[in-house]
Image: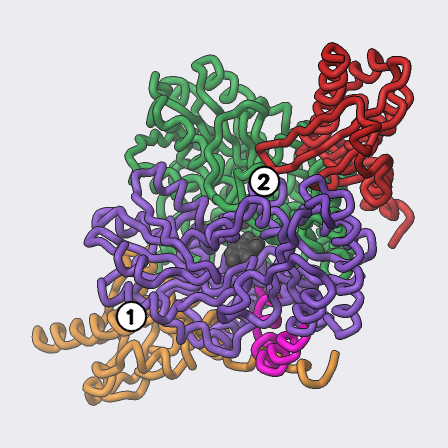
Chain colours: A green, B purple, C orange, D red
Amino acid sequence: MIYLDHNATTPVDRRVFEAMVPFFQERWGNPSSPYRFGNQARAAVELARKRIADGFGCKPTELVFCSSGTESDNLALRGVARALRSKGNHIVTSAIEHHAVLHTCKALEGEGFQVTYVPVTSDGVVDVESLAGSLRNDTVLVSVMHANNETGVVQPVEELAALAHRRGVLFHTDAVQSAGKLPRRLADLGADLVTFSAHKLYGPKGAAALYVREGTPLASVTTGGAQEHGIRAGTENVAGIVGFAEAVALAFEKVESEGGRLRALRDRLERGVTSAVRGVRINGATALRVPNTSSLSFEDIDGESIVLGLDVQGICVSTGSACSTGEPEPSHVLRAMGLSPRDAQGTIRVSLGHETREEHIDTTVRALKETVARLRKISSVRGAAE
Amino acid sequence: MIYLDHNATTPVDRRVFEAMVPFFQERWGNPSSPYRFGNQARAAVELARKRIADGFGCKPTELVFCSSGTESDNLALRGVARALRSKGNHIVTSAIEHHAVLHTCKALEGEGFQVTYVPVTSDGVVDVESLAGSLRNDTVLVSVMHANNETGVVQPVEELAALAHRRGVLFHTDAVQSAGKLPRRLADLGADLVTFSAHKLYGPKGAAALYVREGTPLASVTTGGAQEHGIRAGTENVAGIVGFAEAVALAFEKVESEGGRLRALRDRLERGVTSAVRGVRINGATALRVPNTSSLSFEDIDGESIVLGLDVQGICVSTGSACSTGEPEPSHVLRAMGLSPRDAQGTIRVSLGHETREEHIDTTVRALKETVARLRKISSVRGAAE
Amino acid sequence: MEDESDNSNREPEVLPGPVLFYNEVVIDHFMNPRNVGELPEAETDGFGLVGDPSCGDQMKLWIAVRDDRIARVAFKSFGCPGAIATSSMLTALAEGKSIEDARRITDDDVIEALGGIPEKKRHCSLLGVRALQAAIEDWEKRRARS
Amino acid sequence: MEDESDNSNREPEVLPGPVLFYNEVVIDHFMNPRNVGELPEAETDGFGLVGDPSCGDQMKLWIAVRDDRIARVAFKSFGCPGAIATSSMLTALAEGKSIEDARRITDDDVIEALGGIPEKKRHCSLLGVRALQAAIEDWEKRRARS
Ligand SMILES: Cc1ncc(COP(=O)(O)O)c(C=O)c1O
Ligand SMILES: Cc1ncc(COP(=O)(O)O)c(C=O)c1O
């Protein structure tokens, strides 16, 4: 199998798995239990928090563990909205956020909040002017993602955070797709809240975190025991959290060299595809992107058909974001960048990772060339001339 | 180590662990991904759902996977409250619920709901008359737990559910402490919503479920992708869910014989302690209890000191619920049963499990006798006469 | 692993519950669709063009009719694998059938012939059926005109 | 496992951040508390009784004073391990000290002598210090009276 969908999920690194194993059958105590065996588990959770804080560049107490990037996003948006409801009820976000943010904004609209969805330029970058113009006196939160999951386009988060802060507004960024991919400390982004998720960086599914800058008002969303300072109650997924920490440590160990390697492979892919196939467009190509992601639109054919065509040959790529599978509408991200519904429908996402090698890229280019040609022969919208 | 705190958490069964292992480094696809490798993960999640539904006695589509019992409780209460807000804003629960329910009720009070906390009798059973009398025309939900985590006392959930239904009110039960311990299908309880959690029945931390009877109105609480029908968005903890299913299957395999074995051991413990130690009381002894749990109150000494005294000898027991550790107030459950603050403070919970053997019980009785005597010698509230 | 639990966690061949993914028959029809192409104007007795506005899929279908039977059928399709595979199977089912029988082909027939398709892809199968019906109507109109 | 990652996930001896659990010194003072008991009325020069209303802990402390020094001290305690261990350490620190020095013992001194206690148990250490101060006040009152 050639797996080129690392933005959907990643394999658990061997060292991550090995770090997790003792927590299933040996050190399986409850971190809240009042004896040493429980405290062993507590210590493991707190050490994991410390390791992640070190990688992130924050204090351990500024991290709240959650079960998924989606939950982290929900906690950030709902938590701030509820904490600041008396201060205002306007939220600003972008048109290209992940559904975890967009659908949560919709839900908050149902609770009486007003939400402005800031547009993006044709290369997929949030329009800074528009965002600046959208801030109001009753704005309580701006949420703009760091790297987009479909295009890999990196948003000017530092600038946007500063802009929000000048107006006294809190800033959240969903860094699920940049964490571990960019050689920088997430704390330096200047955001008050940052979401990231273990399974996108070779950690396990079921663990994620929300960074909450000290002093940021945040209401708890899941209530119960005293875990995570009561902000996010529930018995901790100890093994998952330990694996998460190991994954973060590994990610930061080699983020620079791996970034360079992936960028070269991605460039090879894009060169290969554009020279092998006509009628292809690389979305966000002119913008700053995380090094592993390529969004390719093919004229006159359907992205899901390309995906299955490649799947049959053992190559895994994706249409839009994995989470939107099952939704027939074409990607809101590509539509926001100005693509027609049909071009958006003809798009695949190729996202590289640790196991990706040159020969995988070359095999993929050949398979793509053949699959695209085959589908265009079937296509009812393809000009008869060709 | 003699571990006697199975109500706090349980070890992951070897077979559960083995069922999980392939999902970290081999079959780690994202269930939402549109290719066969992703679909393998989807199939694993859906098979797990089917297996749990079989054990539970419901349809697979009636189960929503969550990350903890706490999250399930939150989803049940917040989800129904929001879905039925226009119908009414009164909720009924009991004074002895887990904090996952009680603190969520408090949070809902903050959102404008009214909550009635029904008292319990001195043996820890929810007062049926009081509950009947508390129902109002604007009551939208009754939530009463199945087995109490501190005393093991089983509540008359069938009766209470029928009572609620006669008034057209939805019924939720937190079955975290009964699932896998009582030889009955949880579906037969008659509840509309049921919470249960993997790590209490030899499954992993990080997986739990909410049963939602078909047709029950429930608003989603965590929004994002289409996972769990959009009721609970977020990439699924595939390994955790697979382990959860294996644990449920194992639990139902031998629930009857294991229940009998544990009851005999529990009786041996209680006989042993009451004959070895004076001034001890067994809370809820006269009520129906799950077979593994014993709540013991010792006069004139502090429960946490007993816990540490046993811990030093390699025996793990707990004070009140593990989750309330760190909260200095004595158990709200014992207080609701009429215990004085001092008696509540002198209480430990002993909860047996699969690995528990007769000799563990006998060792524990001896250690308890010695520890209690030692602490009473130190005690400043012990009558000088003794 | 012990014997007792050996098989309990294997996925069964056919999963209980809804079809989750394309089966081998569907994938075969997607990879090797039957009757792909266009009929030349001269040979075309009926033509249908339909689209699914909800997902943007589109299908064109040509038929040649001899003695009230579908002698030849051809299609082109822009759409997801479900749309292509169901279109292919639809043409396979229609070819050689009398117009009356062809008209009665339902999307359930197509899905059954394929051995099932994922629930969320059911609407794709309608595309082929509707395109065939449009082509038959077109044939009727042309016949009425001539 | 490879060498590189061998130690990275082991808990260090001392965890960064707050103390999470009772250390060995605390556990020793809990298991073998120093100066447990009561002084007979005749030997008692000062007595203190304090309680922590927030958690129900209670402590009684007796002192015998010779030449403005604490010659003997004894305590009894109802409470959590933190309360017992800090009481024990407090008496160990106080024994033999001059009244003036004993009066200046703070809860931080007790905690430091124990090598730290969990954050949420800090309030326990106050109990011993307050009981000692109450006993010293009692001694002063008795002295003033006699
Ligand atoms: C940008 C972004 N945000 C949030 C999420 C959701 O994270 P998770 O899959 O951990 O719920 C994803 C994953 O698809 C993502 O790409
Ligand atoms: C009765 C009850 N409900 C809910 C919970 C919370 O479940 P979890 O630990 O999975 O968050 C517990 C666990 O302590 C419990 O005993």
Tell me: A46 left or right of B283: right
Q: Chain of mark 1?
A: C
Which residue is depicted at the point 25% across and 74% down? C132
The CB of the residue at mark 2 lies under 8 Å from ligand 2 = no
| Magenta-drawn segment | B240-265
Question: Looking at the rendering, in which quadrant would you find the N terminus of chain B?
Answer: bottom right
**Is residue B11 in sight in this rendering?**
yes
Amino acid type for the residue under numbered disc 2: Glu
Distance Cα–Cα, label 2 vs label 1? 61 Å
Relative to residue A55, is residue B347 drawn left or right?
left
Of helix, strand and loop, which mostly describes the magenta segment?
helix
The residue tagged 2 is: B327
Task: Identify which residue is drawn at 74% across, 16% down.
Answer: D142
CB within 8 Å, label 2 to label 1: no
What residue is drawn where x is 20% and y is 70%? C134
Q: Which residue is mark 1?
A: C126
| Image coordinates for residue B225, horizontal then vertical, percent | 44, 51
**Residue kind at label 1, given as amino acid type:** Leu
Q: Is residue A200 left or right of residue C39?
A: right
Q: Does C5 sit above or below residue A148?
A: below
Residue at the limit of the structure toward the left, as seen here: C145
- State whether residue B94 is above or below residue A274: below
Chain under numbered label 2: B
Q: Are marks 2 and 1 on the same chain?
A: no
- Judged from the image, the secondary structure of the residue bearing numbered disc 1 is helix
Q: Residues within 10 Å of mark 2 (few under 14, many from 20)?
A: few
Foreground residue, A291 or B274? Answer: B274
Is residue C50 or residue A212 the one in the foreground? A212
Residue B261: percent from the left, percent from the top? 66, 79
Q: Position of residue C110 (x, y in %)?
A: 34, 79
